[in-house]
Image (spheres, grey):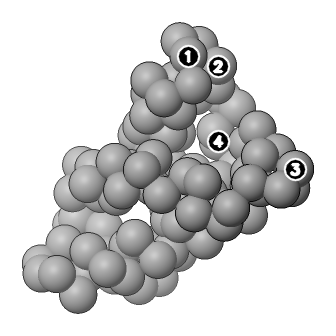
Amino acid sequence: MKDRRDYEKSLEIIGAMIRAWDPYDLIAGGAPANEFDDQVARITAKVPSFYGIDEIAQTISDVFSASFGPGTLAPVDCFRPAQEIFMELRRAKLLPAA
C-alpha cells in the first residue's frame, strides 16, 4: 500500500469479504455489521506482507484466533475468504510486487 487511499480501499475490500463470510454467523444472528471491524483493521495492516493466498489465510486465522480463542479458525478454514481477498486486492493492484 502506497498511501492512505490504498489503505482505505484495502480496508473496504477486506471488510466486505469478512462480513460476507461471517465466520461465526454473528452478523447473521443480529450482530451489527461492524462486528468484525477490529479484525478487518488488523488483517488490513498486514496487506504489505501478502504475497499469496496462504499468507492471507494464516493472517485471518491468527487474527480471529487471537480475538475469539486459540484455534477457533485454522488456516484451512480461512482459505475461501483468503482466496477472494487475494483476487480482489490483486485486481485493485493493492498487493506488493512479487
If you read the primary sequence from the N terminus, does the residue marked by circle 4 or circle 3 appear first?
A: 3
Q: Position of residue 21 (x, y in %)?
A: 74, 55
Residue 82 visible at all:
yes
Which residue lies at the image location 53% right of the left edge and 12% below the top edge? 70
If you read the primary sequence from the N terminus, does the residue marked by circle 3 or circle 1 appear first?
A: 3
Q: Is residue 54 above or below residue 72?
A: below
Q: Mark 4: which secondary structure?
A: helix
| Numbered circle sitting on residue 79 | 4
**Label 1, on which residue?**
69
Measured in 3D between alpha carbons, the distance from the residue under mark 3 to the one under mark 2, in whole angstroms, is: 18 Å
**Mark 1 is on which residue type?**
Gly
Q: Is residue 87 above or below residue 45?
A: below
| Numbered circle sitting on residue 72 | 2
Q: Are marks 2 and 1 in contact (CB under 8 Å)?
A: yes
Q: Position of residue 46 (x, y in %)?
A: 27, 50
Measured in 3D between alpha carbons, the distance from the residue under mark 4 to the one under mark 3, in whole angstroms, is: 23 Å
Measured in 3D between alpha carbons, the distance from the residue under mark 4 to the one under mark 2, in whole angstroms, is: 14 Å
If you read the primary sequence from the N terminus, does the residue marked by circle 1 or circle 4 appear first?
A: 1
Q: Please identify, in this view, whether the residue under mark 3 or under mark 1 is nearer the observer.
A: 3
**Label 3, on which residue?**
29
Q: Is residue 78 left or right of residue 67?
A: right
